[in-house]
Image: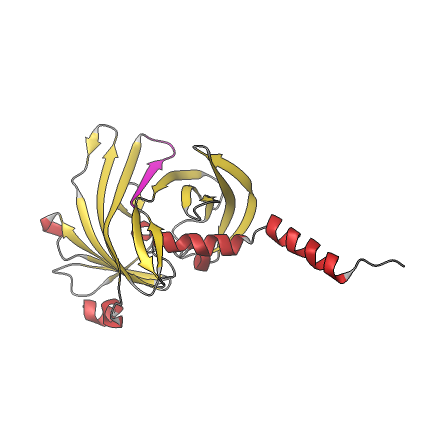
Amino acid sequence: MNTLPKSLLMLLWSAAAFAAPDAHTILKDSDQARGGGLPGIVWEIKVLSRDGERTDEVQRLLVKAVDDSSVAETVEPVRFKGAKILQVGRNMWLTRPGLSKPIPISPRQRMSGQASNGDIAATNYAGDYDAQLAGTESIDGEPCHVLELSAKHKRTTYDRIRYWVSIARGVGVKAEFYSVSGKLLKTARMDYNNAIEHEGKRVPFVSKMTIRDALIDAETTMEFGTVKVKKISASEFDLGQMQ
């Protein structure tokens, strides 16, 4: 029986591997542009929410994150100043001046407008979701990998996500968030006009995320600024320090 030369087999294998990129690798690489997989990062978020004609007051948060831990502290409005949302692994708590102890909360609870608590934390989709490649599509003329993400556990912010990742830039540009039953809940678009320095490279970082409700005329815009990669003390994520 004839067999193909080893060199030709290796060439065919390499071509197949190039033609079918790994969904998990695409997802993991895209997380970096939204705070995931970095040694430590600090940024500010300005949150603006609109529901029909009504506009909520502006919120400002200071976020610090390392791996799957993050803490977001409210800077404005003044009456909520000092309130914090702490995430460690799959658990999340809220504390604010006057509370005797932190309150366990869910990443799925709404923080402001259409933004859930989990939306303000560093993105760790590669750790929280299984990914499958569903093809390619263009978003505003930009070719993207389309990933189908399914939650690995019940502590994720969403049950399912359809995620568009730019092939050229390696960043997530669009997302659709679904319930476990398949109902579309929200959509999001992301811009990347920020940049960080990491391992000698200039890496794009999210500058704006706009989340829209799928059923009503309501949206929340999160603007990200003053982004810095820096070492953060483990004490920042100590639940006991929050009490």
Instruction: State left or right for residue 168 relative to residue 58.
Output: right
Where residue 184 appears, x then y in whole percent? 44, 38
Percent x, y for residue 91? 34, 62
Q: 243 or 134, which is in the foreground?
A: 134
Q: Toward which corner of the image does residue 222 lie, by quadrant?
A: top left
* Residue 86 seen anywhere in this rendered image of the structure: no
Magenta: main secondary structure: strand
Residue 38 forms part of the magenta stretch: no
- Residue 36 lies in quadrant: bottom left
Is residue 157 toward the left or the right of residue 207 in the image? right
Span colored in magenta:
207-216
Q: Is residue 216 above or below residue 235?
A: above
Determine the residue positioned at 33% across, 39% down: 211
Front one among 57 and 122: 122
Question: Could you tell me residue 179's position as x and y percent?
Answer: 45, 44
- Residue at point 27%, 71% (across, down): 234
Query: Is 85 rendered above or below residue 233?
Result: above
Q: Which of the image's four quarters has the C terminus? A: bottom left
Give the residue furthest to the left. Answer: 78
Q: Nearer the viewer, residue 141 or 187?
A: 141
Colour mapping used in the image = secondary structure
